[in-house]
Image (cartoon, rainbow, N blue to C red):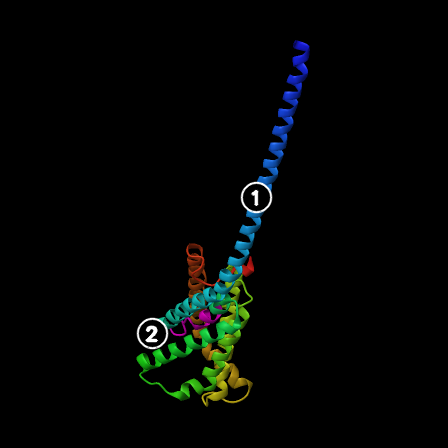
Amino acid sequence: MESRGKPRLFFFIFARHHSSETLLIKRHHSSEILFIERHHSSEILFTERHHSVKIPMRTNDYTSSAIRVLLICLAASATRILPHPVNFGPLTAVALFAGYRLGSWKAAIPVVLLSAFLSDLLVNALLYQVVEAQYFLSPVTLSIYGFYIAASVASARINLMKPRTLVASGLASSVRVFLISNGAVWATSTSYPSGLGGLMASYIAGIPFFPYTLMGDLFYLSILVLGTSWVEQKMPSFLPKTDRFR
């Protein structure tokens, strides 16, 4: 009886083993197929959402954050009406900051020109109580505005978060403003004789004001760049990204 029972027991164990193994394989494959189906369906869903939601929102996010940059630049430019040393102003820093933060000269130029124009209107109306079109069309004003445009275009490719770059950009911009403004005054004013001697006299007359220009540029540039960098860390979507430098 025992010799006849062993083959049956062996066959029964063998059959159960293979049936459970088959069942396990079937379950394994069915779960794998189910996982693949779910994986592909979720991947398709993610792709559809990615193309339908995230890509269109990038333009809207940039536009809204660019408007916030404009408001920051307008607020900084408006500080010109506060008491300050002569030539200690924010506009050069605003031009550099707008190009750096927006990363596009097409977006930066309107921001810079609007900030400069509105702040000039504000200063002339409140402090001098005179608003004349001749001021905005003068060679001195147009040459300075031209520099602001050039500064915003150049700063779109500069990482101002590096301390050396920030200081070098502020210093170079201050020197350019000094050369352009005093050169324009010499070219359009009768206070200086024509020729190299008159040009050098105009530059010499402007030297006492240069330290205030440099301090103002470095002060405002540091506040704008470092301050908005801190805001970017706290609220990443509030301002345009500057991760193109990383």
Earlier sequence position, callout 2 versus callout 1: 1
| For residue 243, above or below residue 185 | above
Instruction: Name the quadrant containing residue 118.
Output: bottom left
Q: What is the total number of numbered labels drawn onto the structure image? A: 2
Query: Residue 216 location, x and y as percent?
Result: 42, 68
Q: Residue at x 55, y 54 (%)?
A: 44
* Residue 52 visible in the displayed image: yes
Query: Residue 119 location, x and y as percent?
Result: 38, 76
Q: Residue at x 44, y 87 (%)?
A: 137
Report the quarter where the C terminus lies.
Answer: bottom right
Q: CA distance from mark 2 to mark 1?
A: 69 Å
* Residue 185 visible in the displayed image: no
Mark 1 is on which residue type? Leu
Return the mark for residue 18: none
Residue closer to the observer: 26 or 179: 26
Residue marked by disc 2: 81
**Range drawn in magenta:** 86-96
Asked if labels 1 and 2 touch by Cβ distance under 8 angstroms, the answer is no
Report the quarter where the N terminus lies.
Answer: top right
Q: Is residue 243 magenta?
A: no
Instruction: Name the quadrant containing residue 115.
Output: bottom left
Secondary structure category for the residue under label 1: helix
Mark 2 is on which residue type? Ile
Instruction: Name the quadrant containing residue 74.
Output: bottom left
Residue closer to the observer: 217 or 137: 137
Q: Residue at x 66, y 14 (%)?
A: 6
Residue marked by disc 1: 34
11 vs 179, left or right, is right
Around disc 1, counting alpha carbons within 10 Å, would you say few (fewer than 14), some (14 to 19), or many (20 or more)? few
Query: Residue 213 location, x and y as percent?
Result: 44, 71
